[in-house]
């Protein structure tokens, strides 16, 4: 492994060259949000003196439970550059936003803290697709998304989302030095990260910082109004024992972060599946709910999708509850008449798995089609469903659940938390992942998943554009197929009451 020093607008950066990928790890894009900068919008990190050692990962954001390597000083990013950049061609750039319900995660990836190659290590993706991948950290939980603005105007809102914008501004100012094309930037996220990517289209100050979006399993109905967010913030401070909000900086951040467990229970008594903290549509920074028809004007070309069995991994949450209790938890604000319509769309006596499918459809699939319908008015939209389940997930009855696609897309298929995900199925899984990475890479290059450039030979299975009438959807499994009206029977029943799922 060789070191490599790069000259950038920020200063000298020492990265490392491994095989065919240069990695620049732990590059600061903003000043550390500590002390007087805590609960403030990020401030651009300017030049440094000397040489930055970018050969090791920096800190992950503060979260609960805490693990080694978490810190308030977390606004760093990693840059993965394929060796082919030396050919002098400016490469497209994709910026990765990790998921974790706005309270968990980090850009190193799940297992990186144990010294192994992390889930979000983008070496394979960058090299195979000849693109530059930037993975970023953003503030979580209390520090990133708790709406203290509703209690005191001394605090700013949507800090985690503003961190993402600052990282995009870093890309605009610096990525040319790494060999990237500032005029071809894709914002890519999964789960909470996907919701942030979609929401960024509704942030006026960020509209020129990226050109395309990839959204995987975004739960878009979880965004708060200022009134909802203020209620949660007040309850959070009550649980934390904070009596004077102006002195919140004096409290131990570890103790404050632990409150997330209590606030989770409080929130989920009211809205099942909703994260305890969320981006807030404040009408100033985040102008619109990212599921409204405004996307016809605000939207960008998008590759958007979800997994076939998103919520089955959450099944244990619903065990022990009767049918009516579960329905009230999934739809707390909906009238009883509508809850019955939803049940009628499924089996008459649903088991826990069926309840999970209901939750998954509402939280992920309906939102996916709402966004796709709106953006397809003026922009290219490509919709997918992921339908391949690792062996271990099938054994647990999870199927193609939430996050199941991530090891395949990043090409990091080693045991996860000690679980051999693809036991006996490694070859098939690797082939599925390689095909998906190629489609994703083509979209990053050209905005069309079928080819990177107009003259290229298209993929074996052509991925047709989505429209509200054709409803084309690529189905990824052991084999791929582009079919029409994916989930049409269920979706038509649910979208027949679409006004319940579109916030305005």
Image (cartoon, rainbow, N blue to C red):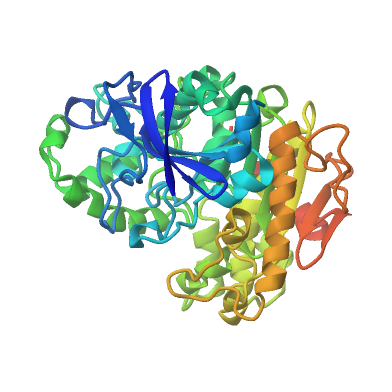
Determine the residue positioned at 45% across, 34% down.
Answer: 225
Res 341 visible: no
How many marks overall? 0
Residue toward you, 339 or 91: 91
Above/below status of 500 relative to 340: above
Camera-nearest residue between 491 and 168 = 168
**Quadrant the C terminus occupies:** top right
Percent x, y for residue 470? 89, 44
| Residue 274 showing in the rendered view | yes
The reply, left or right, for residue 292 in relation to residue 379 is left
| 155 over 126 or under it: above or below | above
Which residue is pictured at 16% across the width and 36% down the height? 248
Residue drawn at the location 34% of the way across and 25% of the way down:
42
Q: Pick whichever, 261 or 75, lies toward us.
A: 75
Q: Position of residue 400 (x, y in %)?
A: 64, 67
Q: Residue furthest front?
A: 2
> Percent position (x, y) of residue 87?
65, 30
Left or right: 173 in relation to 469: left
Give the quarter of the image for residue 33.
top left
Q: Is residue 490 above or below residue 151?
A: below
Q: Nearer the viewer, residue 348 or 389?
A: 389
Measured as percent of width and height from the top left, residue 138 is found at 39, 38
Figure check: 96 above or below 148:
below
């Amino acid at each position: 492994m060789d070191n490599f020093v790069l000259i950038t607008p920020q200063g000298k950066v020492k990265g490392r060259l491994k095989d065919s990928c240069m990695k620049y790890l732990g590059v600061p894009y903003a000043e550390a949000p500590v002390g007087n900068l805590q609960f403030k919008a990020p401030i651009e990190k300017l030049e440094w003196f000397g040489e930055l050692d970018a050969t090791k990962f920096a800190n992950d954001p503060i979260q609960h439970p805490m693990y080694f390597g978490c810190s308030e000083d977390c606004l760093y990013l990693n840059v993965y550059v394929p060796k082919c950049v030396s050919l002098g061609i400016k490469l497209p750039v994709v910026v990765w936003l990790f998921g974790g319900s706005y309270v968990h995660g980090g850009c190193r990836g799940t297992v990186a803290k144990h010294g192994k190659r992390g889930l979000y290590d983008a070496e394979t993706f960058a090299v195979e697709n000849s693109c530059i991948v930037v993975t970023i950290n953003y503030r979580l939980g209390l520090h990133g998304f708790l709406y203290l603005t509703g209690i005191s105007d001394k605090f700013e809102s949507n800090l985690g989302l503003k961190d993402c914008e600052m990282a995009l501004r870093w890309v605009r100012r610096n990525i040319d030095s790494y060999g990237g094309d500032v005029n071809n930037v894709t914002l890519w996220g999964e789960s909470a990260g996907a919701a942030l990517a979609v929401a960024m289209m509704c942030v006026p100050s960020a509209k020129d910082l990226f050109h395309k979006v990839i959204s995987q399993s975004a739960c878009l109905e979880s965004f708060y109004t200022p009134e909802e967010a203020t209620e949660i913030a007040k309850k959070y401070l009550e649980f934390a024992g904070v009596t004077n909000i102006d002195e919140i900086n004096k409290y131990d951040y570890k103790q404050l972060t632990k409150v997330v467990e209590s606030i989770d229970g409080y929130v989920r008594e009211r809205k099942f599946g909703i994260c305890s903290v969320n981006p807030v549509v404040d009408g100033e920074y985040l102008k619109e709910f990212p599921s409204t028809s405004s996307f016809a004007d605000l939207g960008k070309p998008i590759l958007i999708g979800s997994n076939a069995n998103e919520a089955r991994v959450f099944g244990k949450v619903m065990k022990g509850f009767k049918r009516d209790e579960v329905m009230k938890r999934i739809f707390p604000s909906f009238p009883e008449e509508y809850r019955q319509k939803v049940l009628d769309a499924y089996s008459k006596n649903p088991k826990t798995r069926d309840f999970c499918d209901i939750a998954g459809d509402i939280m992920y699939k309906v939102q996916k089609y709402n966004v796709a319908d709106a953006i397809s008015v003026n922009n290219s939209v490509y919709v997918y469903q992921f339908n391949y389940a690792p062996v271990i997930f099938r054994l647990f009855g999870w199927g193609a659940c939430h996050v199941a696609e991530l090891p395949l897309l990043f090409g990091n298929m080693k045991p996860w938390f000690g679980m051999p995900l693809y036991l006996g199925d490694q070859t098939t899984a690797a082939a599925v992942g390689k095909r998906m990475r190629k489609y994703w890479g083509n979209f990053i290059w050209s905005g069309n998943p079928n080819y990177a450039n107009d003259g290229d030979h298209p993929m074996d299975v052509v991925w047709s554009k989505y429209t509200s009438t054709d409803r084309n959807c690529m189905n990824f499994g052991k084999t791929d197929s582009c079919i029409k009206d994916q989930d049409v029977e269920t979706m038509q029943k649910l979208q027949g009451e679409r006004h319940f799922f579109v916030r305005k």
